Image (spheres, grey):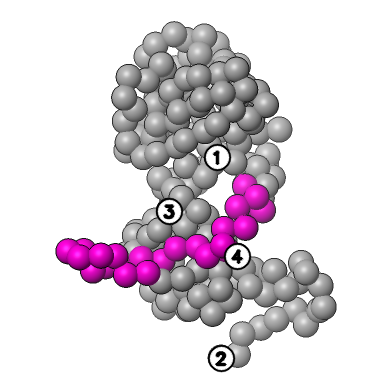
Amino acid sequence: MARQTYGQYCGLAHALDIVGQRWALLIVRDLLVGPRRYTDLKQGLPGIPSNILSARLKELEDADVIARRALPRPSNAVVYELTDYGSALEDAVKSLGRWGARTLGEPDPDDAVTVDSMVMALRSTFHPDAARDVTLTYELRLGPIVLSARIDRGELEVVEGAADRPDLVIETGPAVKALMAREITPEDAIALGSVSVTGDPALLATFADVFSIP
């Protein structure tokens, strides 16, 4: 089947021709976190049919957005990773994520939350100016997902897994969005039990300042 295009001589239309197909930008989102095997992408995108994932990967590879790379022995696995051209989508992906989060309501029971989506959520909502004098490490626990976010004077590193000696451990669920969108104060979030913390509770206010949805 021939790939559909918008047929317009326009940068935006051409961009949508490349990454506007269903699932394409979510594949890019996950690869912004790091290289992934086919099985990693399939696991991180619950609900994507195998034939659609294969088609999107081929389309993105043909467009020089992603490339395949064989890992050295003993792995010999093949991973997909963004090219320089594909990596240039990071600002657009983060901007779209922030824009969408502004009207993101409560999750449906079947909505998936993945490690890569949360890593990118933190990277998208991070405000370097608000963190220029901040040196802290947060551990964020969202059900089975555990992330560590290290802030060092306006620089952010987010990785999967528990933090080494975090300054604050935050355990929460969907309420993290309300906190980041200032729909609830840090004090009320703790008082209502929608967020629990281990460490100095005052650091939750810093978290809400540094990771915020405008």
Q: Quadrant of the N terminus?
A: bottom right
Q: Nearer the viewer, mark 2 or mark 1?
A: 1
Crowding around mark 1 (Cα neighbors within 10 Å: few <14, some 14 to 19, many 20+) is: some
Which residue in the structure is indicated by mark 2?
A: 1
Indicate the amino acid at tag 4: Tyr
Q: Which residue shows up at 31% across the image and 30% down it?
A: 162
* Left or right relative to 156: residue 142: left
Report, in whole angstroms, how far the alpha carbon at label 3 lies from the one at label 2: 31 Å
Real-space Cα separation, disc 2 to disc 1, in angstroms: 37 Å
Query: Could you tell me how far apart the alpha carbons at marks 1 and 3 are, in whole angstroms?
Result: 13 Å
Horizontal side of residue 154 vs 112, given as left or right: right
Residue 46 in sight: no
Question: For the residues marked 4 and 2, what is the alpha-carbon distance in whole angstroms?
Answer: 26 Å
Quarter-of-image position of residue 166: top left
Which amino acid does the dot numbered 1 rest on?
Answer: Arg
Residue 123: give its label.
Answer: 1
Say what secondary structure mark 4 lies in: helix
Residue 177 spot, x, y in % from top left: 56, 33
Q: Position of residue 208 (x, y in %)?
A: 58, 22
| Mark whose residue sits in front, 4 or 3 | 4
Residue extent of the magenta highlight? 69-94
Q: Residue at x 46, y 50 (%)?
A: 33
Q: What amino acid is at disc 3?
A: Gly
The earlier-in-sequence mark between 1 and 3 is 3
Of labels 2 and 1, earlier in sequence is 2
| Picture layout, residue 120 above or below residue 201 | below
